[in-house]
Amino acid sequence: MVDAALQAGTAHRRSVFELFARRLSGARRYGVVVGTGRLLEAIERFRFTDAELAFLREQRVVGDQTLDWLADFRFSGHIWGYPEGEVFFPGSPLLTVESSFAEGVLLETLALSILNADSAVGTAASRMVHAAAGKPLAEMGSRRTGEYSAVAAARAAYIAGFTATSNLEAGRSHGIPTMGTAAHSFTLLHDSEREAFAAQVAALGTDTTLLVDTYDIDQGVRTAIEVAGVDLGAVRIDSGDLPVVVRRVRHLLDELGATRTRITVTNDLDEHTVAALAASPVDSFGVGTSVVVGSGTPTMGMVYKLVAHEDATGAWVSVAKKSAEKASVGGRKSVRRAFGADGVAAKELILLGDGPGGATEADDTAGREVLVPLVVDGVLQPGFTGLDGIAAARERHRVSVSELPLVAMSLTRGDPAIPTEYR
């Protein structure tokens, strides 16, 4: 497209691209924007080096004019968007990119690949956090996704309210608290469960978490307390009928005098099993496969469409797809979230007009503006990347979810928690 547009003389037309989801995948009640910070960092370092240019030349993907243009590529436009951690709904313009057509169209796959995956994880994680009713959750899904995706998933889950990750690279690169427990292989390595527990306590102290279900759970609990004493930090259960087993283990721990020893559970948990266990004497959850694959919704179905461009005279023209079931809404847009008298979010207002950065459209200015400037003249705005950006996104998510009506927390499939209205 860039190659053809450069030859046609249209590549430098000022254009507006919009990233949005037509619907909430999996019939979720709300979505969570996650990955914005990673995307901004990726855009800042997005370059075509000699290696990429040589490949494009050898494969005859584009012509010499385009190769010269790519060699000097630096994104120089503007980007507005829903700040990371914010909730969203069908049609929400999560990113608005204003630039030349060539610059904007190059960002399509980069933006969609990051935001679709990270937001799917963040949305699933947010549902799990609510289901846990205040009990902490740790992300433990690195073995169920790609090695790079695992780090991104840990970041997304943390922004959505998880308290820790077992992925040490996520801890190193994103400042996420890390945790972990021994696997069954550690117990099986030793001549007895007792020897395995003793080795772990000798190395890590009595505040460690002992895995007690390699053989017999009741005996495992007894052995754990005999080895570590009543001040053992926690036991982990990874199998069995968890609601029943957890109550039995809590009773046994209390009977042995280990009243402060916590219980953490794993075993293929998702938001539904977490909700079922929330009222039981579980102290924390470890979630693996389900969170890193979006709990059955591995992508949010986001798309990236051209919604406006300047014509040959410099006038702005709104454009939109009319395809069946894939129609888009053309034009520049801004967004306000309207609230009821009780302070609960009531609707998402998408206002057609001169777009973000322009005058506020419509008479109804109640609520709050949602879009914020992320990139201005190619320069990243402060506060959205790095450790500070993650901390801000985590807090922003907490606040935005608290504003939603109670129906948003339903784990059943259904309509979005609030309607989207165009004006």
Image: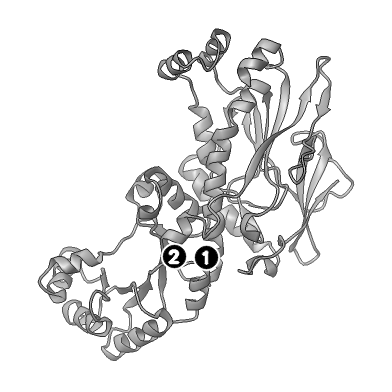
Position of 376 with respect to 39 (left or right) is: right
Farthest top residue in view: 64
Measured as percent of width and height from the top left, residue 194 is found at: 14, 76
State the mark number for residue 128: 1
Q: Are marks 1 and 2 in contact (CB under 8 Å)?
A: yes
Q: Within 10 angstroms of label 2, few (less than 14), some, or many (20 or more) residues?
A: many
Which amino acid type is shown beneath numbered disc 1?
Met
Secondary element under disc 1, as helix, strand or loop, is helix
Question: Real-space Cα distance between discs 1 and 2?
Answer: 8 Å
Q: Residue at x 56, y 43 (%)?
A: 115
Q: Is residue 331 above or below residue 88?
A: above
Q: Residue at x 56, y 67 (%)?
A: 130
Seen from the viewer's position, the closer of residues 317 and 197 is 317
Which amino acid type is shown beneath numbered disc 2?
Leu
Measured as percent of width and height from the top left, residue 56 is found at: 48, 17
> Can residue 186 be seen at all in this image of the molecule?
yes
Position of 221 with respect to 286 (left or right) is: left
Residue bearing mark 2? 137
| Residue 289 position by quadrant | bottom left
**Tally of numbered tags:** 2
Q: Residue at x 12, y 72 (%)?
A: 195
